[in-house]
Amino acid sequence: MIKEKHLPSLQGMFPSWITSCSKDGEPNTTVISQIWYVDEKHVALSFQFFNKTKRNISENPYAYATISDPSTLKQYNLELKFDHAETEGDLFEEMDMKLQAIASMTGMTGIFKLQAADVYEVLSITD
Amino acid sequence: MIPDLTLSALENGFGHFGVASNNNKTRHVDTLGVNVDSKNSTLTCYVRNDETKEVLEFLNESGRISFFVGMITHEAYNFKGQFVEVINLSRDDLEASNIYRNKIIDTITSIGMSKEGALSKYGIIPDIGIKFKVDKVFVQTPGPDAGKEIGE
């Protein structure tokens, strides 16, 4: 599902965006700093705040995301389904470390705090 | 309903226009500029028709919209509202889009991204506008206040 050509888009060089939906049918579109590669069928999103996306996903596990190749800005659209959350382990530690680095570079130290690595199944990817 | 403090982000920020279907699946599309009608609390987002097939299908089902605008400073807002209509773009709309897209191309290149990449995305001319009536506006700047409704 996730191929070599998609990997540059999953390194956080250019923001990604995601649209989720509440159980009542209210969409929510927002930007996220990075969608993380987990394996060829899964990606992860950082859970930092109990925000609208997190609330929506707890009600309705489906989401739609766009990632961009930083060298060409070519976009790929991903249909996602929430799978599980991880609060420890290699994936969590890697995401936490990168998040702290981003926070430091953007003057947001203390604001970004990783609570979980939310792992999603990739249902489809389209150009 | 469209707060003045959001106008700079609407004029200069990256816009992403999201919708949901009747079975709560979602789609979104990048916008290529926006017309603000504060008097009537409407926004008209400029997009490419060939990039919005599913967005328009979903809009015709539920009509609910989430429009995110965010600037490179991280200042961001989310406009929630109800679909009104799809319009053909006037000369003024196209000129407004042209000004907006040039600013976005400058922004992208200023952070070290390639001009070719920026032009591939923002060098294209929109051909339709999706108008919606704004009923809620939320702060979306990262941090504890993200999600707070403006005017609440």
Image (cartoon, coloured by chain):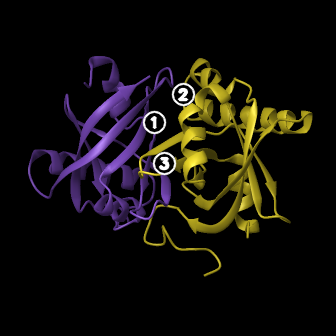
State the residue at coordinates (72%, 33%). B101
Q: Residues within 10 Å of mark 2 (few under 14, many from 20)?
A: some
Answer with mark 2 or mark 3, whichever residue precedes in sequence.
3
Say if residue B1 shows up in the picture.
yes
Q: Element at badge 2?
A: loop
Label 1 and label 3: CA atoms lie apart by 28 Å
- Label 3 marks which chain's residue? B
The percent coordinates of residue A74 (x first, y second) are 49, 23
Label 1 and label 2: CA atoms lie apart by 9 Å
Query: What is the total number of numbered labels drawn onto the structure image?
Result: 3
Q: Is residue A42 left or right of residue A50?
A: left
The percent coordinates of residue B13 (x first, y second) are 65, 47
Q: Nearer the viewer, mark 2 or mark 3?
A: 3
Q: Which residue is mark 2?
A: B113
Comparing B92 with A57, the one in front is A57
Q: Nearer the viewer, mark 1 or mark 2?
A: 1
State the residue at coordinates (49%, 61%). A26
Q: Element at badge 3?
A: loop
Question: Which colour denotes chain A?
Answer: purple
The amino acid on which the numbered mark 1 sits, given as a three-letter code, is Phe
The amino acid on which the numbered mark 3 sits, given as a three-letter code, is Ser
